Image: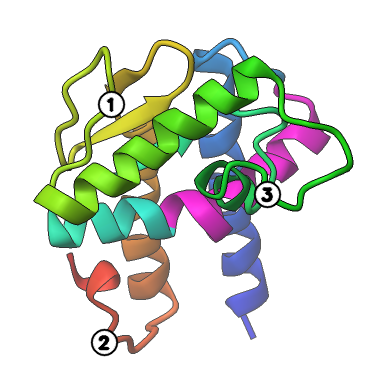
Amino acid sequence: AGDAARWRRHAAALYGLVEAGRRRRGQSASPGDVSRGIKNLLAFEDPSYVLARDSKAFACVTHFGNDGHMRDVELLFGFAGVGKTEPSPEQRAQSWQFQKAVVTFARTGRPEVEGAKWEGYPHVMHLQKSPELKTFKEELEEFQELKRKIIADLRINTILPQNLA
């Protein structure tokens, strides 16, 4: 009977975690933007973080256009079949950067981009005009702790490795 109240408390904690992270980065913390940030965290950022952490893998974030879902496919295939206009020189450069990262990873097991040395976890490469190696966002680590609290508080039985780390 008390699970609803506990879920609301955990949801409020997640909202606060994402809101604080957005404020630290100087981003909008409006309710709509925080809500979109939560969706992005749950659907994309956390799985990417967990995969990189658990396998000590390489990770990247593409900064292209509106960074919509599946934009990496457009970059990988050089915009073939996308839209009716030719890609701009900037789009071609971004596509080349992404393609080089994929190809060098396939050939050597280590992705490469010009202008930055790519390291695995806990780093993430931000693919943009001037690539930049950073650590994962602070709230991703904070979210791992929140997940552990949710699992313990609600007595969730899980065998998922990301929930045991």
Residue under the point 42% across and 37% down: 98
Name the residue tied to disc 2: 159
In the picture, measured across the screen, residue 11 lies left or right of residue 103, that is right
- In the image, residue 29 lies at what x, y percent? 70, 23
Name the mark nearer the viewer: 3 or 1. 3
| Residue stretch rendered in magenta on the structure | 29-46
Identify residue for label 3.
80
Please provide percent x and percent y for residue 105: 21, 48
In this rendering, is residue 12 above or below 159?
Answer: above
Question: Disc 2, disc 1: CB below 8 Å?
Answer: no
- Pointer 1: what residue? 113
Q: Residue at x 53, y 49 (%)?
A: 41
137 to the left or right of 105: right
Q: Is residue 94 magenta?
A: no
Measured Cα–Cα span from mark 3 to mark 2: 41 Å
Residue, x 56% and y 49% (percent of image)?
77
